Image (spheres, rainbow, N blue to C red):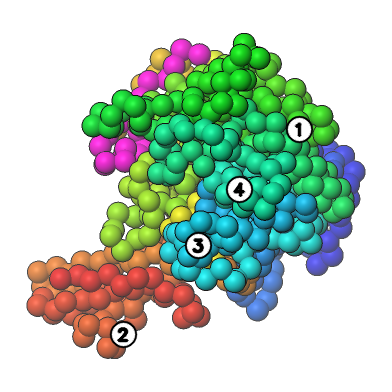
Amino acid sequence: ALVDLSDNESTADISGPESYSMEITTDGTSITAEEPAGLFHGIMSFIGLLNVADSELSLKEMVINDKPRFKYRGHQVDTARNFRSKEAIMKTIDAMALWKLNVMHLALTNDEGWRLEIPGLEELTSVGSKRCFDPNEDTCLLAQLGSGPDADEKQYYTREDYIELLKYAEERNVKILPEFNMPAHARAAVISMEARAKKGDDMYRLTDPEDETHILTIQFYDRTSIINPCLDSSVRFVEKVVTEVKKMHDEAGVPLDSYHFGGDEAKNILLGAGFSSYPDELKELPFSKSPACQAKILEDPSFDIEKIANYWAITVNKILAENGIKEMVAWEDGLRGTTKKQYETESVAVDFWETLFWGGIDGLAEMADGGFDIIMSNPDYLYFDFPYEVNPEERGYYWAARFNSVYKVFTFAPENLAQNAETSVDRDGNEMSVTTPEVTAPSIRGMQGQTWSETIRTDDQYYEMAFPRVLAVAERAWHRASWELDWSSGVTYNATTGLVPKDELAADYNGFVTKLGCHEMFKMKQLGINYRVPPPGGKVDGSGILTANSELPCTAIVYSTDAGNTWSEYSEPVGVGADKVVSLKSVTSDGALMSRVVVIN
């Protein structure tokens, strides 16, 4: 069929920079949009209608008028804790383009690694991207997170790599949002600049050598994991990084319009609950014994040692504005205590990452009242370094959620946070009761899934943890479902309120997961992404009949009654014997991917 593309204004009721109209007839297909982004989405939708597993491609006649729910539809990749190859980033961008996600939040730095070459600051990668056994950390960071002691492997993006990624993403309607986390989570940068200072150049030093403050960070590091905000050399460091990154964007022809500051967890955790056994002399505010900060207090009465994250956010924001960068993004706790009016960039957005069961809905109302744009990045629904299900064989952390299944991600209601208390449980499996605050509904710019990499060492492990959960984010970010209710002040949600139309939710998820298993997973495999295959469920009744099913339709189930020595395909309930131990696993149609084995005893 002939496909006709036009950037003329759509005549449909749906309009906007990413909207499109598509008409499929026996004479051909026409796609019309106001802007190139809309045309791109129309093409992706056309491709999405094709069943690429069939040898003959045919489509029904139809008319589609479509636009996204949210302007920001993101996916975060942590390349700092454990590195992701350039090829893995490119495959992810391909997948994001296909399913209409448009922002890759590329986390390039953290305590455990600096992953982008910065000309003139060579130590950031010659030291900060490597791990080895060097107690003085003059040549590398100490080995951690299962990396081993080998410092020779290249674990960063060169300037040329980053420019290539910017162009690659731009061609696919994806914006790369670079994150350089500070002032906390910055140990790789601090240690790298210390190595430079030992060679006689302290122009970009990030820690005060005379500071004797004792702190313990959330990742159990000392003060060397937080950039000292009182040093002129710290300001010069940020100016240098911003200038060099902006040059890369300019060379790629992709303006650096948005910059992620990080900003989270700049604190001494010994000051919080749970550390009563520690002596009081260890419970110090960050940099409270830094001579540079003591001098700062005297010369600048506005400087508050208790709000160093806020101070540094405003300082960095000013540097961004001076460089013509229109927006700063941050993790919300780094800006809590400030308002949008205190910043100089045109826009300030926050990744909101408080959990619902710890009172997150009040924090959401607070950040919205501060005038910040909100990107929902809630860990109890949208962190992909958590297990898919409750099982000791499943990889991942569980500090905010014991599991984040595809279903749980799909059911997340980003514009009515309280609603999620009716459709999910807290971290410990308990029911929640959440009342919507008596405030105007927050304006949500978008949502984003996060794939932190402390427990994700390889690219294949990353693919398995991110996919297919990424597609559930894509669905919610593009389309508001009929079962999502409006924010209603004073309304309480819990497991028994019955406000969410569960029949509509069930039907919607059934349609989604059927499309996922029978069509989209094949496309993912074609992209070279080894996605997670969920293990089947099963039971053997008293008469020895095995019944099994899979969360992902169109996925084959095989079973074994001899401890996995031989396998038979399961298609319907089958007799295996009441005294048999049965092993089950799911297998893709081509046999290339399979789930972990489930044993029924």
Q: Name the residue under label 1.
A: 320
Select label 1 or label 2 by which is in front.
Answer: 1
Q: Mark 3 points at which residue?
A: 134
Residue 90 % position (x, y)? 68, 63
Select label 1 or label 3 by which is in front.
Answer: 3
In the rendered image, which quarter is residue 5 located in?
A: bottom right
Q: Are marks 3 and 4 in contact (CB under 8 Å)?
A: no
Residue 275 vs residue 17, the one in the foreground? 275
Q: Which residue is drawn at 25% across and 28% down?
A: 276
| Mark 4 or mark 1, earlier in chain | 4
Q: Which amino acid does label 4 sit on?
A: Glu
Select label 4 or label 2 by which is in front.
Answer: 4
Q: Residue 116 carries which label?
A: none
Q: Quick one: SS at disc 1?
A: helix
Label 1, label 2: how far apart the Cα atoms are: 60 Å
Residue 122 in magenta stretch: no
Q: Residue 567 carries which label?
A: 2
Q: Is 195 displayed left or right of 591 in the figure?
A: right
Q: Classify mark 2: residues with Cα within 10 Å, few (<14), some (14-19) or many (20+).
A: some
Q: Quick one: SS at disc 3?
A: loop
Q: What residue type is labelled 3?
A: Asp
Label 4, label 1: how far apart the Cα atoms are: 25 Å
Q: Classify mark 3: residues with Cα within 10 Å, few (<14), some (14-19) or many (20+).
A: some
Q: Is 168 displayed left or right of 48 in the figure?
A: right
Q: Name the residue under label 4.
A: 194
Q: Which amino acid does label 2 sit on?
A: Trp
Q: Quick one: SS at disc 4?
A: helix
Q: Do the residues labelled 1 and 3 touch (CB within 8 Å)?
A: no
